[in-house]
């Protein structure tokens, strides 16, 4: 590649899970520390970072179409196309292929190596094409600049990687083994986040409830201990965590749901299928019944908890009867919200080699039936919450004049009209239920 001028503006586009959103923010801060500014809305950036997701085939294919579009749009404006960096899980999984297939890409950087972006950038400016998909022993977090400016609701990655090796999933390969960040580092980052304006922190991990560490006094603690410690921070009003695995729902974490007031009544606990045969073939370490028993214990200590999950339809060999077991589980739980996906065969995973791959039409039909059931439960949950008064953390302005948007404790999107600022915690009465959001009446501004 020819030498180029160092970029003055950047844009980071993140796809996939919340951890990618978090990584995207950290990469933006890193570029900011190099004196590069975010490109103004609607203007082309000198450097585009595509922070990619590899979880399903469609997500991965998107990278190549995005690269093509960026190049084309750059040329249309008559100038040089922006410098392109591909980061995230596709970079990790297919770094070499990206370099071979997409000559417009200058940098490929994996999720555990992005703290090295400034060095890579210096080399790219000299005309080199640079790939770094190492999973170095040093942690990237130590090399990242401190957090400065965040919204009222912020993410904090506490754990990364996965050792579970579900047979359909790429995450253990793209993110590496389970690693917990150090307690002291997390307390410090949380303090920075609240100092920068966060009132709610969502603790992130691929298996966040596998987090383990030592507290300030050297005692071994799990995620519940970290949550209890964070709950002591006066400026922090709300704590959430995601995504958790049923096998790591400890007794203490369940108890925390009944005891820690700042821990919001919401639990995202993916199950994937209601069939024990399918769960076994997926290498999920739980049965449908085991999963339901965990939820029962959580409900016993926190009866109003809103439950959420992830589902895959059309896993290889899934029969109609097995799919119906998933529908029964959905009805047994009564989820507040859920994510559901068609199985996507991922290169290098054991399930991609299994017999009995399911036809696309069958998957479409099952997904439609599942989503119908999930939507019904979501609306029922929202309808059942009408008349409740609760606090809403105001996150942004709505589309209509005077309208503000935020989240209820149960993670419902709430909109209301009234005098409130972003970052306020207000008291509302939930008044009108839609499938995806709730209309509320502002009662009074709650104590700040
Ligand atoms: N660590 C989390 C989430 C991992 S990815 C967990 O274990 O639950 C998020 C979701 O994507 C998964 O829960 C699963 O429902 C879905 N998913 C993962 N791999 C998939 C694949 N190959 N095809 C379709 N959906 C997939
Ligand atoms: Fe993937 Fe399973 Fe690990 Fe979740 S627990 S990230 S689905 S391998
Ligand atoms: Fe996607 Fe990687 Fe997250 S594959 S879901 S961005 S961990």
Image (spheres, rainbow, N blue to C red):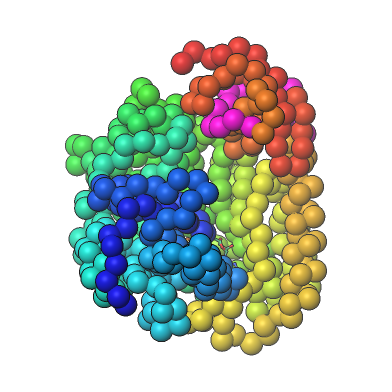
Quadrant containing the N terminus is: bottom left
Q: Is residue 434 above or below residue 165?
A: above
Residue 291 can be seen, yes or no: no
Residue 82: quarter of image: bottom left
Q: Is residue 244 above or below residue 408?
A: below
Image point 45% across, 51% down: which residue?
21
**Residue at left 35%, top 31%?**
196
Q: Could you say which quadrant of the image residue 404 lies in?
A: top right
Report the side of 81 relative to 42 (left or right). left
Residue at 55%, 44% in the rendered image: 267
Q: Image point 74% across, 80% down: which residue?
A: 359
Q: Nearer the viewer, residue 368 or 255?
A: 368
Does the magenta portion include 394?
Answer: yes
**From which residue to which does the magenta span run?**
383-398
* Above or below, 370 relative to 332: below
Q: Quadrant location of residue 91?
A: bottom left
User: As drawn, which residue projects farthest toward the front?
Assistant: 78
């Amino acid at each position: 590649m020819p030498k180029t001028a160092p970029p003055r503006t950047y844009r980071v586009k993140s796809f996939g899970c919340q951890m990618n959103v978090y990584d995207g923010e950290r990469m933006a801060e890193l570029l900011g520390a190099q004196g590069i500014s975010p490109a103004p809305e609607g203007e082309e950036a000198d450097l585009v970072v595509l922070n990619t997701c590899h979880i399903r085939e469609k997500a991965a294919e998107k990278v190549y179409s995005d690269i093509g579009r960026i190049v084309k749009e750059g040329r249309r404006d008559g100038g040089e196309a922006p410098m392109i960096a591909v980061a995230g899980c596709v970079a990790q999984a297919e770094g070499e292929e990206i370099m071979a297939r997409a000559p417009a890409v200058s940098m490929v950087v994996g999720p555990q190596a992005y703290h090295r972006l400034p060095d890579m950038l210096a080399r790219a400016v000299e005309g080199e094409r640079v790939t770094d998909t190492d999973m170095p022993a040093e942690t990237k977090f130590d090399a990242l600049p401190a957090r400065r400016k965040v919204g009222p609701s912020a993410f904090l990655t506490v754990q990364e990687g996965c050792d579970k090796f579900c047979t359909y999933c790429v995450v253990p390969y793209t993110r590496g083994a389970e690693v917990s960040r150090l307690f002291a580092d997390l307390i410090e980052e949380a303090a920075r986040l609240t100092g920068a304006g966060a009132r709610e922190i969502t603790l992130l991990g691929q298996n966040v409830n596998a987090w383990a560490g030592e507290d300030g006094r050297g005692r071994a603690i799990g995620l519940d201990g970290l949550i209890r410690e964070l709950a002591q921070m006066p400026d922090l009003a709300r704590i959430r965590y995601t995504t958790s695995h049923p096998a790591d729902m400890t007794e203490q974490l369940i108890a925390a749901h009944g005891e820690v007031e700042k821990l919001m009544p919401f639990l995202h606990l993916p199950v994937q299928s209601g069939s024990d045969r399918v769960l076994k073939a997926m290498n999920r370490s739980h049965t449908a019944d085991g999963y339901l028993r965990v939820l029962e214990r959580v409900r016993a200590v926190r009866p109003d908890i809103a439950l959420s999950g992830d589902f895959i339809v059309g896993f290889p060999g899934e029969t109609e009867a097995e799919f119906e077991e998933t529908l029964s589980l959905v009805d047994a739980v009564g989820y507040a919200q859920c994510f559901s996906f068609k199985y996507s065969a991922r290169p290098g995973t054991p399930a991609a080699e299994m017999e009995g791959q399911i036809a696309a039409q069958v998957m479409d039909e099952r997904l439609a039936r599942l989503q119908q059931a999930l939507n019904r439960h979501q609306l029922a949950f929202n309808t059942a919450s009408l008349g409740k008064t609760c606090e809403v953390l105001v996150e942004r302005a709505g589309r209509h004049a005077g309208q503000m948007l935020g989240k209820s404790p149960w993670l419902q999107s709430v909109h209301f009209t009234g005098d409130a600022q972003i970052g306020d915690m207000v008291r509302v009465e939930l008044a009108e239920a839609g499938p995806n959001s709730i209309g509320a009446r502002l009662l009074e501004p709650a104590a700040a």
